[in-house]
Every structure is written in structure tokens, then in C-alpha cells.
Image (cartoon, rainbow, N blue to C red):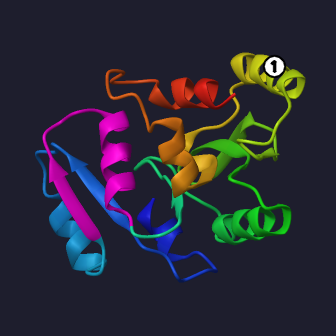
Amino acid sequence: ALDSVFNQTDKDIEVVIVDDGSTDDTCDLINSIYPNTKIIYQNNSGSTAARNTVSRNAKGDWLAFLDSDDYWTEDKLNHQLKLAAKKNLDAVFSNGYFSRNGKKLGLLHKNNMAIELNGVKDHVVKKIFFKAARYTISFPSCTLIKKDAFFELGCFNEELYHSGDYEIFMRAF
């Protein structure tokens, strides 16, 4: 996962990792390979709490999450940032793929969806919501969102140990 972050075409990236109560030496290994990575340690609280911890500690204007079992194509952030700037968007979602051992196995979802969180009309929101509920609008690793917009949504619901990503997307729409 981290290799795909550091291989982005846009090199102006802040990397914040939350060690959510791991008991192995993963963070020592990360520090030895990527010494400029900020690592925050917390008791095991689940993915929603870990993502919120990253959000509160990130210094940039944009948030892009990446789970440890996912990876990005080298131009993912570049494409999303350009689209967001061109269309003045608060969030951009991309496609995602299932893969095993580096081999692409299938499409998770196909959307190439870009939205303006505060500027979509109600009838369009309802259409998008029902599609999202049926097909899943996005996954955290496929999402780029303005930090301010993320906090306006109220962050991930930490009462949900899992599925906080689905819940926040439903709240957005």
C-alpha cells in the first residue's frame, strides 16, 4: 500500500499512518523504509476511529485514505486533484479493483463520479443515494475529499467499528 502512495506522480504528499493497536513490528519497518512518515499510535478502536485520527492530524486541505490491503495507481491523486480543481468539487471518487498478488481480478465498482457535496439538487441526491445503496458509491481508498467538507459531514461514526465508510457516504447524500 505505501509503495503506491510514494510512487504517486504528485510528490507533494503528507503521509499519516495510524497504528490501531497492532502487536507486530510493522511501524518499525515502515519507519526504516519511509522515515518521513508520521505514525500515530492508538489502542485498537477500528477503522472509523483510525481514519478520524488521521483526519484530525493531517495538515493538508485534502484527505485521501488508503487501507493497508489496498493500493493506488501512480496517477490516482493527480487525476482526482485536477478534476476537483477543474470542476470546483469537494469530493472525487474513482474506480476500484479487486486484485490478488498484483493481478487485477475484477471491478469493485464503476462510477468515475464527482460530486459537489453542498450543491446537488434534492432529486439528484435521491437518485445518487439509491444507486449508492445498491452499488456502493465508493470506498475510502477510492475517495479524495476536502478536509473541510469531511468535517462538515461530521467525520466517520466511531460507534460503528466497521462499515463507517458506507454510513458517511449515505449521510453525504
Rendered residue at 40%/50% (across/down): 68
**Left or right of 47: which side holds 103?**
right
Please give the residue where the numbered disc 1 appears in the rendered image: 126
Total residue callouts: 1
**Left or right of 122: which side holds 79?**
left
* Residue type, numbered disc 1: Lys
Quarter occupied by the N terminus: bottom left
Q: Nearer the viewer, residue 108 or 142?
A: 142
Above or below residue 52? Residue 124 is: above
**Left or right of 152: which side holds 134?**
right
Q: Is residue 49 magenta?
A: yes
Q: Which of 139 and 58 is in front in this view?
A: 58
Q: Is residue 53 magenta?
A: yes
Rendered residue at 72%/49% (across/down): 94
Above or below residue 105? Residue 2 is: below
Q: Say few, some or many: other residues with alpha carbon within 10 Å of mark 1 (under 14 / 14 to 19 / 20 or more).
A: few
Rendered residue at 51%/32% (across/down): 165
Residue 156 coordinates in the image, percent (x, y) = 43, 34
Rendered residue at 75%/22% (across/down): 129
Above or below residue 128? Residue 105 is: below
**Left or right of 166: which side holds 108?**
right
Task: Identify the element where label 1 is drawn.
Answer: helix
Residue 46 coordinates in the image, percent (x, y) = 29, 33
Q: Looking at the rendering, which quadrant does residue 74 occupy?
A: bottom right
Quarter occupied by the C terminus: top right
Q: In the image, which residues are magenta?
A: 38-58
Residue 17 coordinates in the image, percent (x, y) = 31, 59
Q: Which of 122 and 58 is in front in this view?
A: 122
